[in-house]
Image: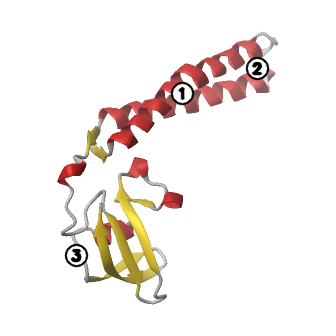
Amino acid sequence: MTITYMTEEGLRKLKEELVHLESVQRPEISRQIAEARDKGDLSENAEYDAAKEAQGILEGKIAQLKSLIASARIIDESSISTDEIQIMNKVTIKNLKTKKDMTYTLVSESEADLKSGKISVNTPIAQGLLGKKVGDKVDIQVPSGTLSFEVLDISI
């Protein structure tokens, strides 16, 4: 089993999502299946097929969330250092080609949300930044080529 490191907030959100799936969506899909079943011949019942497929997808997602929650380990945020880049750090980097500054927080895969500046620690950029210090210049291989960055700031 792979251990997934996350914040308390990230784990809480996963648990809330699981409760919603199990207590709201699961009964709704069961109701849809029963309703479609009541319409008769199941061999040509598209509603029944769609509801059964949705049920399979939902059950897969529930199993995935349960597995993620079971493997979760809370990151002790008080032990996070800013000496070098690690998970849960907020990092400001400068793209040396475009001269643009970008700020990202390195988080677990399940907490990644690019719109709010949170990138997964498993992405090529995060992997290239791990262990670097303020002032370090780093070339990172990404699918579109090589990007060069300078680490400007590390914070929590």
Circle 3 Cα neighbour tier, 10 Å, few/some/many (<14 / 14–19 / ≥20)? some
Cβ atoms at labels 1 and 3 below 8 Å apart: no
Amino acid type at image mark 1: Leu
Query: Residue 21, which numbered label?
Result: 1
Residue 21 % position (x, y): 54, 27
SS class of the residue under badge 3? loop
Query: Sequence order check: which comes first, mark 1 or mark 2?
Result: 1
SS class of the residue under badge 2? helix
Looking at the rendering, in which quadrant would you find the C terminus? bottom left
Residue 11 % position (x, y): 37, 38
Residue 63 % position (x, y): 44, 30
Q: Nearer the viewer, mark 1 or mark 2?
A: 1
Instruction: Identify residue for label 2.
Output: 43
Judge from the rendering whether residue 47 lies leftward or rightward of residue 144; answer left or right. Answer: right
The colour scheme applied to this rendered structure is secondary structure
Judge from the rendering whether residue 11 lies leftward or rightward of residue 59; answer left or right. Answer: left
Residue situated in front as seen by the camera: 49 or 10: 10
Query: Sequence order check: which comes first, mark 2 or mark 3?
Result: 2
Amino acid type at image mark 3: Lys
Amino acid type at image mark 2: Ser
**Rendering quarter of residue 43:** top right
Task: Identify which residue is drawn at 18% across, 69% down.
Answer: 83
Task: Identify which residue is drawn at 34% across, 69% down.
Answer: 91
SS class of the residue under badge 1? helix
Circle 2 Cα neighbour tier, 10 Å, few/some/many (<14 / 14–19 / ≥20)? few
Cβ atoms at labels 1 and 2 below 8 Å apart: no
Task: Identify which residue is drawn at 59% across, 22% down.
Answer: 24
Instruction: Identify residue for label 3.
Output: 133
Find the distance from the CA under tag 1 to the CA under tag 3. 42 Å
As displayed, is residue 114 above or below residue 99?
A: above
Task: Identify which residue is drawn at 42% across, 60% down.
Answer: 119
**Rendering quarter of residue 67:** top left
